[in-house]
Image (cartoon, rainbow, N blue to C red):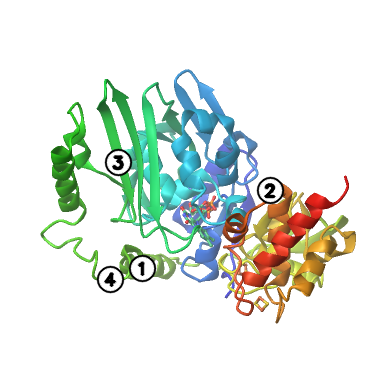
């Protein structure tokens, strides 16, 4: 399914974005990485009249330490959190958590600001900012305001932001000595949304917790900071006290009045929330109140497999369709169109992304590489041979996305073990092979490359 038509405005600055939001009000939606917004639009759960694309605003991207505060720009991507030395040193909880967020191609586009503004109760990063006692910085027509993370999340997909405000940054107190962090989630597969998870920060002094913040996610309509943690602060932690705290926690998450009593009776908390999500999205789509605004075509210039391309496209044309329909590069396949199957994976400026979740207008100025480009250059010839020799393809529908994703893994991690290969490819679905042969082919290619003379 494709998104309904919409108008598109590429913001040139934060001030410009705020002006656009002021003009269009709740008919506009901010577009950052698009990794949550585009699936919702492709599924027609959301139909904004205009997208205000802030993705190019460099002023909103980056990580800096000022005094005892770590400042993370809203457009900082998940992959940046994973790789940043500042995050590793001052807020390792964010790094630990973000490795569980989706798959590499999603992490290369998705942003922390988008994740927090989206406020999915099963998301990892909202629980982290609550556990870290962070502050969300919002900018609107009347200036800037700071919102404690604990006050920011209001419900399923609801935050304290108003439609004319932008989330511009997150401020995290830098971890002091004695701080320790814990992150754990249970998901059906690595990269899936959590069934339940915990992001925690503790400060330990003289063998006691002087502070303990337990941020649970996927347990309610927003991240939950467990009050039960207070039982363990400044106390000598022994098995009896731990048992008492665990009982308090159970009551808090699963109140005896039955308001959260679904746990244990249904497959997952997320399954139980889904009807509510659908209800809210469907309502938003119904009240979308389309006023007949025609989405004007937009000029784009980009490089595709090294060749300069100029085109005029409708804002709703996603990159996968542009490559396939306009440029006849049909090696990029389309399966789910909401970011799940990986068939449409391409490289943008050297990093893998889902082309079904990217608008062509967002690729303006970028260098796009498709399976045709990677094949013609010979870059993946050995990988393609290994796939053929080991029967790692049957119908071939998943193969272009699989090859591009496998090559991405070997670029970043030349000697992966089978577990790492499985994890990296876990965002790519194959209906035919059972995956074993694909993992064999990638492993064999890695071995052969390692043995190749430099
Ligand atoms: C297959 C798949 C699996 C995923 N798995 C996970 C997962 O396991 N865990 C997880 O947490 N996420 C997951 N995600 C979502 C992903 O992490 C998104 O990147 C993230 O939720 C949204 O970030 P974005 O930059 O893409 O935001 P967008 O999609 O651009 O925007 C999301 C929402 O936030 C609003 N918004 C964006 N930026 C701002 C801003 N600066 N100010 C105000 N409003 C703003 C938009 O209007 C929109 O309503 C998954 C996505 C896909 C497609
Ligand atoms: S078509 Fe893009 S991920 Fe399935
Ligand atoms: S080979 Fe058919 S989907 Fe993978």
> Residue 134 — which label?
none
> Residue 266 — which label?
4
Q: Position of residue 83 (x, y in %)?
A: 60, 38
Upstream in the sequence, badge 1 or badge 4? 4
Disc 3 from disc 1: Cα separation? 25 Å
Disc 2 from disc 1: Cα separation? 37 Å
Would you say the residues marked 3 and 1 are in contact, meaning their CB atoms lie under 8 Å apart? Answer: no
Upstream in the sequence, badge 4 or badge 2? 4
Indicate which quadrant contains ligand 2: bottom right
- Left or right: residue 417 versus residue 174 is right
Point 83% across, 62% down: residue: 382
Indicate the secondary structure of the residue bearing disc 1. Answer: helix
The residue furthest front is 451
Disc 4 from disc 2: Cα separation? 39 Å
4 vs 2, front mark: 2
The residue furthest left is 257
Q: Disc 4 beta carbon < 8 A from ligand 1?
A: no
Upstream in the sequence, badge 3 or badge 1? 3
Point 43% across, 64% down: residue: 188
Q: Which residue is mark 3?
A: 214
Q: Residues within 10 Å of mark 2 (few under 14, many from 20)?
A: few
Disc 4 from disc 3: Cα separation? 24 Å
Would you say the residues marked 1 and 4 are in contact, meaning their CB atoms lie under 8 Å apart? Answer: no
Q: Which residue is mark 1?
A: 274
Q: Which residue is mark 2?
A: 413
Q: Residues within 10 Å of mark 4 (few under 14, many from 20)?
A: few
Indicate the secondary structure of the residue bearing disc 2. Answer: loop
Q: Is residue 15 above or below residue 436?
A: above
Upstream in the sequence, badge 2 or badge 1? 1
């Amino acid at each position: 399914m494709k998104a309904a038509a919409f108008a598109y405005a590429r913001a040139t600055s934060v001030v410009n974005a705020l002006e656009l939001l002021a003009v269009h009000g709740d008919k506009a939606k901010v577009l950052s990485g698009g990794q949550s917004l585009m699936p919702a639009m492709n599924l027609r759960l959301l139909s904004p009249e205009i997208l205000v694309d802030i993705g190019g605003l460099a002023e909103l991207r980056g990580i800096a330490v000022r005094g005892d505060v770590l400042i993370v720009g809203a457009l900082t991507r998940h992959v940046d959190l994973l790789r940043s030395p500042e995050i590793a040193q001052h807020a390792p909880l964010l790094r630990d958590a973000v490795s569980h967020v989706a798959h590499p191609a999603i992490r290369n586009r998705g942003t922390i600001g988008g994740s927090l503004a989206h406020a999915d109760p099963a998301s990892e990063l909202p629980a982290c900012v609550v556990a870290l006692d962070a502050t969300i910085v919002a900018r609107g027509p009347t200036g800037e305001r700071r919102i404690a993370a604990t006050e920011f999340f209001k419900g399923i997909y609801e935050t304290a932001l108003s439609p004319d405000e932008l989330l511009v940054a997150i401020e995290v107190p830098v971890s002091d000595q004695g701080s320790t962090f814990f992150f754990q989630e249970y998901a059906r597969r690595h990269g899936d949304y959590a069934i339940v998870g915990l992001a925690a920060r503790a400060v330990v002094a003289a063998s006691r917790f002087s502070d303990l913040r337990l941020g649970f996610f996927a347990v309610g309509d927003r991240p939950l900071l467990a009050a039960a943690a207070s039982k363990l602060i400044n106390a000598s932690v022994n098995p009896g006290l731990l048992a008492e705290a665990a009982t308090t926690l159970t009551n808090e998450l699963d109140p005896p009045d039955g308001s959260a009593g679904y746990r244990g009776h249904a497959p997952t908390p997320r399954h139980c929330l889904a009807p509510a999500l659908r209800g809210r999205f469907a309502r938003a789509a119904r009240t979308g109140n389309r006023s007949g605004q025609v989405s004007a075509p937009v000029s784009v210039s980009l490089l595709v497999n090294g060749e300069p391309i100029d085109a005029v496209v409708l804002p709703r044309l996603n990159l996968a369709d542009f490559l396939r329909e306009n440029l006849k590069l049909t090696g990029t396949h389309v399966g789910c169109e909401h970011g799940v199957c990986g068939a449409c994976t391409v490289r943008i400026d050297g990093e893998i992304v889902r082309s079904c979740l990217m608008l062509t207008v967002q690729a303006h100025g970028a260098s796009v590489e498709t399976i045709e480009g990677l094949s013609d250059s010979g870059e993946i010839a050995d990988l393609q041979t290994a796939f053929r020799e080991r029967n790692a393809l049957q119908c071939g529908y998943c193969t272009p996305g699989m090859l591009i994703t496998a090559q991405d893994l070997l670029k970043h991690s030349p000697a992966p073990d089978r577990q790492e290969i499985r994890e990296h490819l876990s965002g790519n679905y194959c209906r035919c092979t059972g995956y074993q042969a694909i993992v064999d082919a990638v492993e064999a290619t890695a071995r052969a490359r390692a043995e190749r003379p430099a």
